[in-house]
Image (cartoon, rainbow, N blue to C red):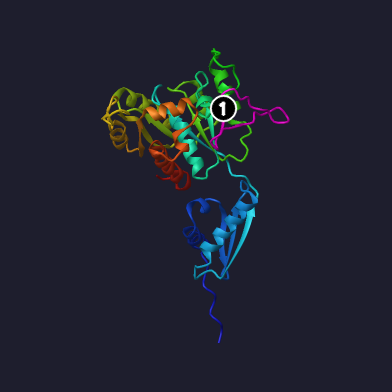
Amino acid sequence: MDNPPPPSRSPAAEEALIRAALTPAIADRLRSARIVAGRAVIVAEAGDLSDQGRAELEAAITAALTPLPEIAEVRIALTGERRRRRLIAVGSGKGGVGKSTLTTNLAVALAKLGRRVGVIDGDIYGPSQPKLLKTEGVKPAATSDGKQLVAIDSPHGVKVLSMGHIVAPGKALAWRGPMTGKALSQLVDADWGETDLLLVDLPPGTGDVQLSMLSAHKPDGAVLVSTPQDLALIDAARAGQLFEQGEVPIIGLVENMAGYCCPECGHISDPFGSGGVEKFAAALEIPFLGRVPLTLATRIAGDRGEPPAAGEGEEAAPFAAIAQKLARWLDTGAI
């Protein structure tokens, strides 16, 4: 009697089975995945990982796939290709909404989650990140060939570069549009080491820096920041339209300065209104990432270069919650 023919293989179904067993972050690293005679053959990208990270990746893939009844053996090949560094813009339609403070604390909170994060201070005319990340007076080095700046290590596990590190403190810049675009490129194209995520603290509005970034360094996504009052929301909508025209996904909106808690009596007041950003996000069908209250402690900590997100106190909680949503978007494409 003739032996029955082996069942037909479906490479797409095999890959789907394997990907479903892995976490989104690990599945994103797969370059190919198939099952041959009960053996899972995996090719995964690990160029940005240390030796320990590569070993941990192999162990995690093996542990996830071994229990599957379709798989008797797991074989893994790790490639040396380096993952593209991802760029997230943090913008607003107007100034004074706390965008720079949010960028700093979001970066620190992401670093606490294990992300390798850097901050680009895109506000060429009014840089804030040197003070917020306690790197005032530090000058960036250059690579050995002199072609790149080397990002500065802050005390909070986040790398940073700003025109405030290059130009003398207090010196006013009178640059035309092309010069600001060139300055932004110099910061983006710097040597960021093993950093795989850059948050760009944009200046307010929809001017030359934003247009230069969209044309030369298109972000993977954008976070919009606004206070609750109508005027700020109108300007935030303009910023959102610019990103949409540039085909940059809007990850979500953050409501900043959402209520003020009096340090003396504990009374909560709403000098900028309340809930406006969440309603605005719902109307536009944009994810709402969370709200950050206006507190004296946050302001004092920012002036000292000690981001509240670096601690574990009450002021750190809003930033941690927003960072977790952003990390989920980075891993899965959804909040």
Q: Residue furthest front?
A: 264
Magenta-tinted stretch: 136-161
Tell me which corner region of the image, top left, top right, bottom left or bottom right, holds residue 242.
top left
Which one is in front, 11 or 102?
A: 102
Location of residue 100 in the rendering, given as x and y in whole percent from the top left corner: 46, 27
* Secondary structure type for disc 1: loop
Query: Going by the image, does 99 lie left or right of 31?
Result: left
Residue picked out by circle 1: 135
* Residue 50, placed above or below residue 232: below
* Residue 174, placed above or below residue 247: above
- Whether 141 is among the magenta residues is yes
Question: Considering the image in quadrants, where does the C terminus appear?
Answer: top left
* Point 48% across, 31% down: residue: 306
Which one is in front, 153 or 16?
A: 153
* Residue 80, placed above or below residue 186: below
Location of residue 48 in the rendering, given as x and y in whole percent from the top left corner: 61, 46
Location of residue 72 in the rendering, given as x and y in whole percent from the top left corner: 56, 71
Query: Going by the image, does 65 lie left or right of 273?
Result: right
Question: Considering the image in quadrants, where does the N terminus appear?
Answer: bottom right
* Point 42% across, 34% down: residue: 223
- Whether 261 is among the magenta residues is no
Q: Residue furthest right?
A: 145
Q: Residue furthest bottom?
A: 1
Location of residue 257 in the rendering, given as x and y in whole percent from the top left corner: 35, 29
Visible in this render: residue 7? yes
* Residue 245, placed above or below residue 43: above
Determine the main secondary structure of the stretch shown in magenta: loop
Numbered marks: total: 1
Query: Going by the image, does 117 lie left or right of 147?
Result: left
